[in-house]
Image (cartoon, rainbow, N blue to C red):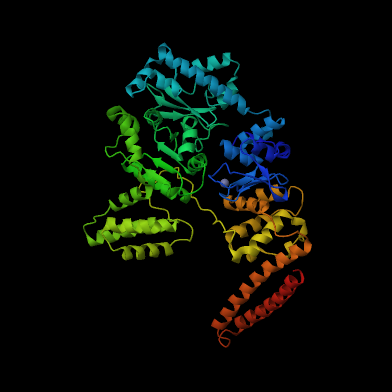
Amino acid sequence: MAGRINDEDIALVRERARIDEVVSSYLTLRRSGGGSMVGLCPFHDEKTPSFQVTPARGLFYCFGCGEGGDVISFLQKINNLTFTEAVQQLADRVGVQLRISDDGQHTSSGPSRIRILEANQAAHEFFVSQLAGAEGLSGRQFLAGRGFDRTAAEHFGVGYAPTSGRALKQHLNGRGFSDAELVRAGLIREAGYDFFQGRVLWPIKDSGRAVLGFGARKLFDDDRIPAKYINTPETVVYKKSQVLYGLDLARQNIGRKSQAVVVEGYTDVMAAHVAGVDTAVASCGTAFGDEHARLLQRLMGNHDVFNGEVIFTFDGDQAGQNAAIKVFNGDQNFITQTYVAVEPTGLDPCDLRMQHGDAAVRELVARRIPLYQFVMANVLAQHDLDRGDGRLAALRQAAPLVGSIRDTSLVNQYLRELASMLGMDIEEVRREVSRSSRRRIPGRPDPVRTLDPAPDDVLSATTLPWPDPADRQLDAERSTLKLMLQHPTLFDQEWDGVVAEDFSHPAYRAVFAAISQVPWRPDRWTDGVRDATPDETARQLQIALLVESLPGEPDETYATAYASRLRLIAVTANIRDLKGRLQRTNPVEHRPEYDAMFGRLLDLEMRRKQLQLAVAGNE
Ligand code: ZN
């Protein structure tokens, strides 16, 4: 990662940028109890405000959808920015001059991100003018051959890179950009030649319409680069796992319709938009991955699995099937809102529009089917369902797919559909599915076998389960952590004897692990704990716990009572386990073990009495 911002500068930005002020430019906040403010969440649809901002802690948290963070992450989420971009925006707002180091190695004036965006913008304008010029004829012919006229080319900002090899460099040098800047922007190569030569280009923008990079298609047979498509290399502003072509045009429609259509190429995005499918985007030079999925979810404005649709237009061929399976193995929350639109004749949206017109593209999208159905049908197609052993083999392979669905309300529906596809009894199918589920690690979907695994596998989405805040059994764990995070100084340095094993829920245990790892110092406390929390769920949970109100006025007695109560529950559970083990152990045959366990039981019982007294005395 290039371009690391100086930590002190980040801290200064955090300190100066008031979260309530920043949030207030996006939604209306009103005062509520305890110095907090509430408003309607910008990240999910709601009628009663559950979006809370606590200015004193510089944090926000939505009790409806679970979004939360500090002023930087708020800006990232609402404007879909990278961390660096958000810090830059805030720095401008509060007047902090950022020092950016190169790869964190040494501080230097570094590549100015703004400078790179300016260079990209200037390059974009140059390419557009070249498409209209004499040499751009091949580019114009390419576009016309795919059904796009001049208006369409202008609307999508399509450009042309001349073949000369130095045209862009000379043009931009003349505009005051140095070679070093152009190399950093990915516009020229180290040797001083234009990165793109003799190609038709599409500008890849962020949702705020800044040009991040380009995608380029080969036009000439004698092109020295054989690849049909090439993209801007990874730069400070261009990260292929995070950019989507068409986002600038589709962003508002995606939010308004809670729908996004993912197509495969630049001309497919163009065809879709021209045909009236104005929510179309495409990943650029890489497979659609988890980061893309999260980006679309944010733009759809909610994290509710029953809201919003992401529709993929995959080919019916092997590559399309593998792409579908990759999506299936990605973010679980994504699956239930994921659909596939497959054109039976295998035409992509661009060809479809040329051969059958705009309406055919809209119909393709309207004919979507749920992703799991597509994946399932492909699995079943590999077996001879006319034979008993074929049906059984198909069931064995399909069962883990149904078993990996976490949304239990959908499982029955899927079971019925699978049973009917196989022509089998639903109970038989149910038994196989639960058998296959038991073979899996709980909460973690089994990887579905990909027939031809692609090298750049999407990240596996394994994350901690989110604890139910209303779960009475976990109340002591939640309350103690809230107190520890909000009032760490009320505890002694050993956290009043609390240990990680006292937490039964893995997410709570992860939050405590971070707490106990950070040096016990009241300054920089919140930041320190956040930095020590690697898991995203735990980080979100930690923010929720920082913002949630406490019952009653916190003091040291209160802290001791909470810690004691938590320990008491854990000790009681230990005693129960140990008693069970003692009952199962033969005291004659296993004398030494039995005695050791018995001694431990007595210790625990004594500990339990002390804790009971501590809890009673402090309540
Ligand atoms: Zn929300």
In this view, the residue farthest toward the bottom is 588
Q: Quadrant of the N terminus?
A: top right
Q: Is residue 295 left or right of residue 400?
A: right
Quarter of the view holding residue 508: bottom right
Quarter of the view holding residue 200: top left
Vertical relation: 13 (above or below) 424: above
Q: Position of residue 179 (x, y in %)?
A: 58, 20
Q: In this rendering, does residue 220 appear at all?
A: no
In front: 312, or 37? 37
Residue in view at x 54 percent, y 19 percent: 122
In front: 33, or 272? 33
Q: Position of residue 312 (x, y in %)?
A: 39, 40
Residue in view at x 62 percent, y 41 percent: 73
Vertical relation: 134 (above or below) 606: above
In this view, the residue farthest toward the top is 134
Q: Is residue 241 left or right of residue 395?
A: right
Q: Position of residue 591 (x, y in %)?
A: 60, 85
In front: 359, or 130? 359
Q: In this rendering, does residue 510 appear at all?
A: yes
Q: Is residue 550 left or right of residue 268?
A: right
Q: Position of residue 175 (x, y in %)?
A: 58, 15
Residue in view at x 41 percent, y 43 percent: 454
Q: Quadrant of the C terminus?
A: bottom right
| Count of labels in the image | 0
Vertical relation: 543 (above or below) 475: above
